[in-house]
């Protein structure tokens, strides 16, 4: 017997549940999903069990759910093979050649920030990242930029809950220092990594926003401090902003 309620079949219900959870991670438990989508609670639990088993969702705190690794994998494949990938990478390559450094793109996924593309410049000292790797929110320029673009309460909650490895002597793990850093980033519109992720490496990140001015991607570069210091990185921000505007048209055209 096929399962139908309000004209929705099981596959459609599963997609509706996924869409709801991804739109606002850690906000929906089974009862809230049931009420929002008007799906029987028993059916919601059954679909959630399947989605968690297949790693599309992960059971989180307070009986809520967040996107799982399978969602991340699908998103990464979509941005890798989308029709505009050649155009996107041409803009990244243009920036790489201009500033003579490797440039990277990362994207939010729930409460995480995922690296998904970069164009390398031929320097011996590079950050070794693979598509799908998570960036440390407290230690990377893009991670701090992402948190600074949230409301203060949400940013502080995430900062308090994440694992804050003390990678270097400059890594921010203190909440008061973090609040000061977030305020500085909000005022400037960009974020620096001053040897906070790796000793001897510095970086800068700027936002790529949608029409609502929400951060959707981070455009960043990291380099050896022996090649460029923070003052040098500040000088390349105008070039990064120019390319970010071009990338907005490619990444957010819909």
Image (cartoon, rainbow, N blue to C red):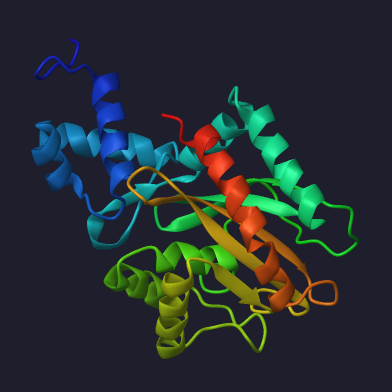
19 or 9, which is in the foreground?
19
9 or 233, which is in the foreground?
233
In the rendered image, the vertical position of residue 194 relative to residue 247, given as above or below: below
User: Residue 46 falls in which quadrant of the image?
Assistant: top left
Residue 162, visible in the rendered structure = no
Residue 241, visible in the rendered structure = yes
Residue appearing at x 69%, y 43% in the figure: 92
Residue 69, x across and y down, in percent: 50, 44
Residue 73, x across and y down, in percent: 55, 38
In this rendering, would 60 be left or right of 69? left
Residue appearing at x 75%, y 42% in the figure: 93
In the rendered image, the vertical position of residue 22 relative to residue 228, given as above or below: above
Residue appearing at x 67%, y 84% in the figure: 168
3 or 219, which is in the foreground?
219
User: Residue 86 falls in which quadrant of the image?
Assistant: top right
Q: Residue furthest top?
A: 1
In this rendering, would 21 be left or right of 188? left
Residue 1, x across and y down, in percent: 18, 10
Residue appearing at x 57%, y 57% in the figure: 134
In the rendered image, the vertical position of residue 162 relative to residue 166, given as above or below: above
Q: Quadrant of the C terminus?
A: top left
In this rendering, would 145 be left or right of 127? left
Residue 34, x across and y down, in percent: 13, 38
Q: How many marks?
A: 0
């Amino acid at each position: 017997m096929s399962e139908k309620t309000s004209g929705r079949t099981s596959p459609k219900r599963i997609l509706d549940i996924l869409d709801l959870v991804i739109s606002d991670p850690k906000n929906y438990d089974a009862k809230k999903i049931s009420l929002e989508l008007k799906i029987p609670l028993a059916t919601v639990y059954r679909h959630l069990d399947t989605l968690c088993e297949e790693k599309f969702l992960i059971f989180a705190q307070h009986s809520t759910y967040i996107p799982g690794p399978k969602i991340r994998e699908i998103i990464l494949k979509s941005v890798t093979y989308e029709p505009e990938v050649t155009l996107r990478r041409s803009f990244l390559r243009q920036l790489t050649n201009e500033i003579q450094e490797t440039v990277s793109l990362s994207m939010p996924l729930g409460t995480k920030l995922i690296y998904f593309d970069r164009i390398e410049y031929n320097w011996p000292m590079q950050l070794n990242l693979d598509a799908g790797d998570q960036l440390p929110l407290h230690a990377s320029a893009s991670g701090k930029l992402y948190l600074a673009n949230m409301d203060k309460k949400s940013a502080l909650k995430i900062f308090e809950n994440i694992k804050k490895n003390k990678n270097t002597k400059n890594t921010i793990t203190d909440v008061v220092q973090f609040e000061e850093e977030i305020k500085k980033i909000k005022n400037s519109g960009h974020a620096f990594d001053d040897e906070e992720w790796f000793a001897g490496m510095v970086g800068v990140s700027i936002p790529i926003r949608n029409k609502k001015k929400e951060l959707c991607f981070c455009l960043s570069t990291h380099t050896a401090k022996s090649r460029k210091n923070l003052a040098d990185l500040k000088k390349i921000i105008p070039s990064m902003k120019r390319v970010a505007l071009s990338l907005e048209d490619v990444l957010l055209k819909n």
